Amino acid sequence: MKLEQYAHFFIKKGEYKHQKIYPIIRVKELIAYFYNVRGPHYFFPGESDSNWEFTFVDNGELLSTVEDQTYKISSNQMMIYAPNQFHDQKTLEKATSYLTVIVDLDIGEENKEIISNKVFDLDRDSRQVLDTFIRTDDSISPIEYNKMILTIEKIVVNLLSQQTKPAQKMANTPMQQKFEDELLNEIILYINENIYSPLYVEDLCERFAISRSSLQSLFRNYVYTAPKEYISNLKLEKSKVLIKESKYTISEIAYILGFSSIHYFSRRFKQKFGMSPTDYATKFVD
């Protein structure tokens, strides 16, 4: 069917209605992002910024006071600070790692209220965003930067959708899909919270009462990799962060992340990143 035929079909009998559709949010600029690892009882006295600030807690807990209201942001949760919103941050008894992303965000006042002054749980999409920013180094292309901008926009749109239409979302989700989504989220959260401990597929099966084959299918269908590979890749990504911190030796990092030996860790690191952990550390320091 030609374009003219499509136009005739929609216009005839007065059925055609023209309605302009505009984006409700837009990230105009990705200004900065940085991964923070803070020790126990760290205190940031506070600031206000003219841009939007996203804080994703990877491990540990943050207390943040915003406009005289104190919020606790735990592992796998996030908070969004609006422009010119004064806020401080402090850690508690444990070390805490978190990602900060600063953007110039164009968003209406009604939607601004929806995403401000709240702590949100990270869903699977948001968790993947966090992992994407952690994996990114200084050599990425402009296209990759645009992908990062799109992922932030996706998070905001998802939050707006969840906050404004929760009932509709539930009604449109098949029961099995909902069950698998929740189960996978629980498993991934558990992996991230215990990434510094030895993790085995058998342990996941026992903890979540799921067969090995079902666990494999769950990961391959939604994460596109096997659970063992997912755990290994996540540990390797965490190792890059620890190497950049320069607080531990390569052997200590291998031990902290639960690798069976420094040799196995070095081999897996080189397979994934194309260089040894020592070479990566040297390149980063330089």
Image (cartoon, rainbow, N blue to C red):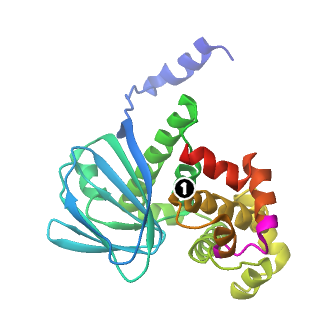
Amino acid beneath label 1: Lys
Residue lying farthest to the left in this orientation? 68
- Please state which of residues 256 and 14 is positioned toward the viewer in this rendering: 256
* Image point (71%, 79%), residue name: 198
Q: How many marks?
A: 1
* Quarter of the figure that contains the N terminus: top right
Please state the horizontal and vertical placement of residue 285, each as a whole percent of the image.
Answer: 54, 48
Please tell me whether residue 24 is drawn above or below residue 18 in the rendered image. Answer: below
* Image point (58%, 63%), residue name: 173
* Image point (75%, 59%), residue name: 221
Please state the horizontal and vertical placement of residue 110, each as a whole percent of the image.
Answer: 23, 50
- Is residue 256 at least partly visible in the picture? yes
Q: Does residue 221 belong to the magenta stretch?
A: no
Residue numbers of the magenta segment? 256-264
99 left or right of 279 in image: left
- Is residue 125 at least partly visible in the picture? no
Please tell me whether residue 54 is drawn above or below residue 174 in the rendered image. Answer: above
- Please state which of residues 25 and 177 is positioned toward the viewer in this rendering: 25
Q: Quadrant of residue 24?
A: top left
- Please state which of residues 21 and 159 is positioned toward the viewer in this rendering: 159
* Label 1 Cα crowd, 10 Å radius (few <14 / some 14-19 / many 20+): some
Q: Quadrant of residue 194?
A: bottom right
For label 1, the residue is 244
Please state the horizontal and vertical placement of residue 271, each as a whole percent of the image.
Answer: 80, 52
Give the secondary structure at mark 1: helix
Please state the horizontal and vertical placement of residue 9, each as a whole percent of the image.
Answer: 56, 22
* Image point (77%, 60%), residue name: 266
Please tell me whether residue 206 is drawn above or below residue 164 in the rendered image. Answer: below
Q: Quadrant of residue 237?
A: bottom right
* Quarter of the figure that contains the C terminus: top right
